Every structure is written in C-alpha cells, then in structure tokens.
Amino acid sequence: MSTLGWGFDPYGISPFGHTSLGGALAGAVAISTHEVLVTLTFEPMNESTTKVGDVSNPATWMVQRLDTLEMLNVIQVNKYGDLEYGIVTYQALGPASVTHRVSTLTLLDSSGALCSPPRQADFAGVIADVDQSPQTKLAQRRVYATDIDNRQTPNVSPDVAGGVLQIGSSGDYELVTGVELVKKLLFRRIMTSPGEFFHLPDYGLGLQLKEPVPVSSLSQKKAELERQALREPEVIEARATITVSSNNVINIQLRVKLQTGETAVVSLPVPSAGVML
C-alpha cells in the first residue's frame, strides 16, 4: 500500500512538506526551523551516540539544501518513536519553497546490518520567503529595543552635549527605551556620514560641523533626512524642516510618528562654514 496521500503527508495534515520513497527511509518532514523528522522502515541500532552507524549518532546523518548545496551540520538526534527520529541541525533550514535532503550512508539495523537503499528522503523547509532582516523582525514585534542611556541630545545638563553614559542609583548604567531611544537613533543617523559603518553603506546623512553647504542642496538633504528616519523600524512617518539662521547655523527639526502612535521630535543646530548660492 502506498503511503502517499492527497496532502503533504499520508494524512494530508502536515503543514510543511513530506516525502515517501521506500527503502530505509519511509519519509521525512520538517517539524521546526532546525529539525527534520525521519521515519524508518526498520528498527535501527540505537546503542551509543558515538558508535558508527548508530541512529543516535549525529555523524550518521547528513542534511543538505538542494538549492545552494549547503551541508547543514547535524548536532543532535531525538527519538520520538520506535521508527521516528528528529535530526537537529545547527543552521536553520531554508524557506518552504526550498527542497532539502536528509540521507545516511552508514545507518545500521538492530542486528548490525547496513540498511538497504535508497537511504535518503527529500523534504521542504519551514521558513516563509519573507524579509528576515533584524530591522524587519523588530518592526514586526512592534516593541522598542533597549540601549544603554548615552544620550545623543544636549539635555543631560546645560553644558554637556550628548554621548554621556548615565549611571543610576544602583551604580549600573541606565537604559533608555521608547521615544528617548528613537531620538538618540535619529541623532546618530543625522551626524553619521555614509560609509562610516562599513556593513551599512547607506546609513547616515553626513552633516558635518563647519561644512560649507550649497543652498541648492538643502531640499535634497531634507528629503534624505526623511528617508533615513523612515529606515528606523519604529518610525512610520517622518517630516523634516531645515532652516538657516543669519549666523550660518543650519537648524534641523525632524518630527516622526512611531508605531505606538507617539511622536518624537529631534531639533539640532549644526554650525556651518557658510551657505553658498
């Protein structure tokens, strides 16, 4: 009797992917982002995690992504039944659209005989094909990160301007979250030049103290300032204004709306060497 059904597994209920080939492996299905459940057609040797060919020995198993041919490191084997074993990998399995293969070359049965071929089974991954960047994950959580409170705005005291670690009554560093953290992150973006963070080449506006600024570039800098603000996961709306005082100080005000509905405002004077026509 065939084990194939109308769904992804014999009963049509598996949410991830299933295969059935005959031979040593009756089937395989991903049950988490790091584990594939294999079903055997015979009782395997299960005596030691270090014995060659033992079902519980991670070295008995191989797991591979077939799109990139990457071999995933097997680190553990879990027993779920007499014929069902979970093969755990160090690296995460790929997306649900990617076919993977679990196989063995050395698996022994309970009598010590090498299992019969085929000794492999293909299965689908479990992760959706979506952006999995840290920024996206943070935005999906709809919560704020926490950072050490080294404020980037001149509000620590009248004569101290940013970058000062705050020490609380416990003697440990204070933490900052929410609106205050967003203001700090926006300040950092404004004062960082593109390329200063090698792994984030598009990060930063790059306004520098005592920099000559062509008046024709102010509208461009305003648009770039709003674009940079929207790259922060917590920010959903951004509006910037840039004005120049009579003593050549560029005044920046950035007002943003957060996912929580709160508003954060960053005002920053940047002394310039002069605004040129």
Image (tube, helix red, strand yellow):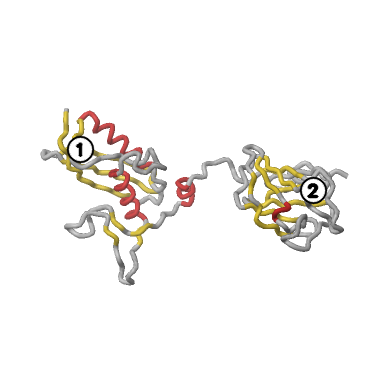
Q: Which residue is the extreme one toward the left?
A: 246
In terms of image quadrants, where is residue 173? bottom left
Q: Position of residue 79 (x, y in %)?
A: 74, 60
Q: Position of residue 145 (x, y in %)?
A: 41, 55
Drawn side of residue 180 relative to residue 109, left or right: left
Up-down: is 96 above or below 49? above
Count of labels shown?
2
Q: Position of residue 66 (x, y in %)?
A: 66, 39
Label 1 belongs to which residue? Answer: 211
- Identity of the residue drawn at 49% across and 45% down: 133
Drawn side of residue 80 relative to residue 229, left or right: right
* Amino acid at the residue labelled 1: Glu
Q: Are marks 1 and 2 in contact (CB under 8 Å)?
A: no
* Amino acid at the residue labelled 2: Leu
Mark 2: few/some/many CA within 10 Å (<14, 14-19, 20+): many
- Mark toward the start of the polypeptide (1 vs 2): 2
In terms of image quadrants, where is residue 241? top left
Label 2 belongs to which residue? Answer: 25
Drawn side of residue 198 relative to residue 86, left or right: left
Rendered-image quadrant of the N terminus? top right
Q: Position of residue 226 (x, y in %)?
A: 32, 39
Up-down: is 1 above or below 219? below
Secondary structure under badge 1? strand
